[in-house]
Image (cartoon, helix red, strand yellow):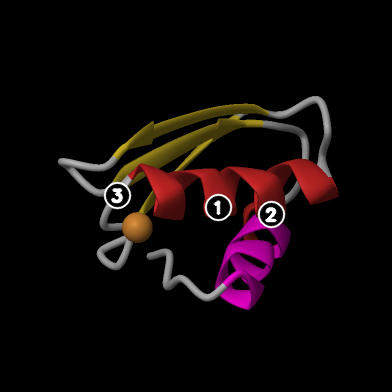
Amino acid sequence: MTLQFTVPDMACGACASTIEQAVKAIDPGAEFEADTTRKIVKISTMTPAAQMQQAIQKAGYNPQ
Ligand SMILES: [Cu+2]
């Protein structure tokens, strides 16, 4: 499934890669796509949305 979050505090590529690392720590096989202009991340994974959201929060961001 593909999860999509809006992450208003994802400002640049470094933020995106921090988030990507947090995502891949949970699911190394996840496909990750970030749009820093639109503040959107798309994650292709079998991990439940709530768990992914929590991992991104722990990395210091606020996915909605
Ligand atoms: Cu940044």
- Based on the displayed image, in which of its 4 quarters is residue 31 positioned? top right
First reached walking from the N terminus: tag 3 or tag 2: 3
Residue 22 tag number = 2
Q: Residue furthest left?
A: 37
Circle 1 packing at 10 Å, graded few (<14), some (14-19), many (20+), is many
What SS does tag 2 mark?
Answer: helix
Residue at the (81%, 25%) spot, across then down: 29
Residue 52: which disc?
none
| Label 1 element class | helix
At a point 29% along the width and 49% down the height, the residue shown is: 12
**Of 16 and 7, the residue lying toward us:** 16
Contact, mark 1 vs mark 2 (Cβ under 8 Å): yes
Left or right: where 3 falls relative to 55: left
Q: Residues within 10 Å of mark 2 (few under 14, many from 20)?
A: many
Give the residue at mark 1. Answer: 19
Q: Which residue does the numbered mark 3 point to in the structure image?
A: 12
Amino acid at the residue labelled 1: Ile
Which quarter shows the C terminus? Answer: bottom left
Which span of residues is magenta-colored? 51-59
Judge from the rendering whether residue 3 lies leftward or rightward of residue 64; answer left or right.
right
**In the figure, is residue 11 to the left or right of 48?**
left
- Amino acid marked by disc 2: Ala
